[in-house]
Amino acid sequence: MKIFYYNLIIISALFMITFPAFSQYEDIELYIYSDDLTKHNRPLVVFSHINHGDCNCIDCTECHHNYDESGENIGGNGGFCLDCHTKNAGDNPIPLMEAFHTQCKQCHAKEIGKSKNKNIPQMCGQCHVKKRE
């Protein structure tokens, strides 16, 4: 019986060590940035997929979206905002900067309304964080 528990402990420990490798989301932090947007009045936003996707409150297609002719969100292909949104409105009627801000602000407002988490950023400087010197 001791051997059974010993093996169970070892298997559990190995599982806990390797489990993050199978996580759906990598702990990737990326700067929301585009070469098309040359002048920035505020620091770049550091976006964390763990904070946004791993909470199980936001579906990937909320950000990585495609819309059909009727305006229905039919999901996305995992692309970047600038794959469809450009600096100036072109084929897509929403320019890149407006797409960034509208997407983030609307989602944060929605999450604040339905969540008890009051740490969701609401002001510009909470996402565009100045580095302390």
Image: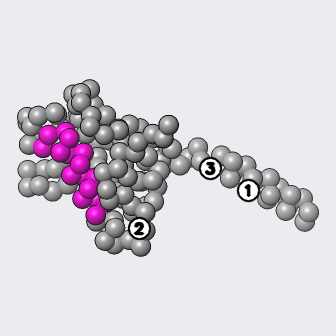
Helix, strand or loop for disc 2: loop
Q: Quadrant of the N terminus?
A: bottom right
- Magenta-highlighted residues: 94-109
The residue under label 2 is 118
Alpha carbon distance from label 1 to label 2: 35 Å
Residue 90 in the figure: left or right of residue 31: left
3D distance between C-alphas at marks 3 and 1 = 10 Å
Return the disc, 3 or 1, that comes first in the chain's sequence: 1
Q: Give the residue drawn at x 47%, y 50%.
A: 50
Nearer-the-camera pick, 124 or 55: 124
User: Residue 22 in the image: x percent, y percent?
Assistant: 56, 46
Given this view, does label 2 or label 3 mark the residue nearer the observer? 2
The amino acid sitting under disc 1 is: Ser
The percent coordinates of residue 59 (x first, y second) are 35, 57
| Residue 61 in view | no
* Dot 1 crowding, Cα within 10 Å, few <14, some 14–19, many 20+: few
**Image position of 115 with respect to 30: above or below:** below
